[in-house]
Amino acid sequence: MLKLIRLVCGAVISLFILWFAMSNYRDARPIAEDNLFGLAHSLHAAIENSVVHDPSLQSLATFHAQDLAYFALVDRDGVYRFHSNQELIGTRLNNSDTLRRLFAETMSGTRVKLATGETAYELYGHIHTPRETLGLRLVLHTYRADAVIRHARLTMAVLFALVAVGWFLTFVIYRYSLREELHRQKMAQRESLAQMGEMGAMLAHEIRNPLAGIKGFAQLIEKRPDDPRTKESAHRIVAEARRLESLVTDLLAFARNDGGEAEPCALAQLVEHCVDLVRSEAEQARVVLVVDCPHDLVVTGKRDRLGQVLLNIVKNGVQAMPDGGELRVTAHPVGPQAIVTISDTGHGISPENLARIFTPFFTTKARGTGLGLALSKKIIEEHHGSIALESSGHGTAVTITLPGARVGEKS
């Protein structure tokens, strides 16, 4: 839709530019004609003024003006009383049509072609003197006036060329962007296939280990049903089955995009609920839980999905401190965002593992699925937020940023 809007806007702008260029060119010729007529009219007035002051017409021999080719005065008998070419003075004009136009009631001007092949502008008028009326034939060069037409023609040609070049470049850029888009899609498809292959291999590995254990313990029970260790083997089968169930649950959670409708959630309630779920495990590991979250801090999101994120990260923090330590969960508003930080005092994550920590199926735990943090990142991005992890030799801190936070409401 956006491309169509851009295309329509480009077409409208191009049509406007072409209309402007053509309109400017069409108006150029009338403007040039008006300029020629105005100049001829001014020269007519100047010549008439000279004749009134000098009826002998002698002063006209020194009359010169820019763009003036020549001019002549003719009496009603068709005799040249004055001509810029002195040799024609006293000769007779034999063209009756020209003589009629010279003594017409109104002035008229037209373009003519001179004997030299040059196009000129010719004005027919008449001059009144105290003794008689003389016809005025005034011929002007047109190259200066025609410069308006040439400029308009050049402008039109340039604008037409620019529009053509612009559309050509647009077509080239469109083809290039289309090829780039297809290339990106192919690369994304290849990357997706590669990730699917990698995930499939990891998934097969994760499933094969519990299945191998289940198979081994089941064979042991089959061979020695009366063995005192049969009960222990049965417990291990159940444990491995639960591990497979947990893996399938995490896979389904990673694949789906539900979890209820977005609603206002009191962040403190979500944090306290997650902390309560891991409190028993934390006490066994001698981990002190510290929560610092305002009770009136509210975010908008899917309650179950956000609770799953917090529970995953809090459990990871507790499990990262088998020798005890402190797990601190803090939250505070920053403008329209809520910042949640979950930090522990464990041994941290090595730099080589830190870069892959959000990769699906990547885990450093012996019996982990490697989907917890990947799922958490996916859920946070579904909420248009971000998640970042920093680690050193003295602990790990996970920072979650959620938009749409406000203070003063509870749910």
Image: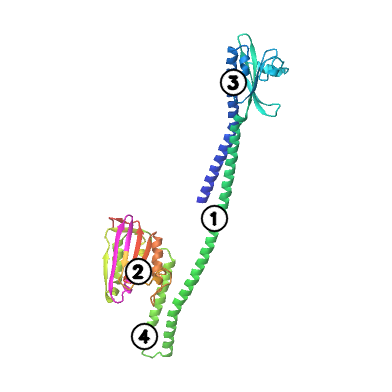
- Disc assigned to residue 43: 3
Residue 307 location, x and y as percent?
Answer: 34, 65
Outermost residue on the right side: it is: 94
Label 4 environment density (alpha carbons within 10 Å; few <14, some 14–19, many ≥20): few
Which one is in front, 200 or 391?
A: 391
What residue would you read off at disc 2? Answer: 391
Is residue 369 found inside the magenta-colored segment of the image? Answer: no
Mark 3 and mark 2 in contact? Answer it, CB < 8 Å: no
Name which residue lies at 59% across and 36% down: 22
Please name the amino acid that badge 4 sits on: Glu
Is residue 337 found inside the magenta-colored segment of the image? Answer: yes
- Disc assigned to residue 177: 1
Q: Earlier along the polypeptide chain: callout 4 or callout 2?
A: 4
Q: Nearer the viewer, mark 3 or mark 2?
A: 3
- Rounded to the nearest angstrom, the CA distance separating label 3 from label 4 is 124 Å
What residue would you read off at disc 4? Answer: 232
Q: Nearer the viewer, mark 1 or mark 4?
A: 1
- Quarter of the view holding residue 317: bottom left
Mark 1 and mark 4 in contact? Answer it, CB < 8 Å: no
Please name the amino acid that badge 3 sits on: Leu
- Span of residues in magenta: 312-340
Residue 65 sits above or below residue 6 on the image:
above
Q: Nearer the viewer, mark 3 or mark 4?
A: 3
Please name the amino acid that badge 1 sits on: Ser
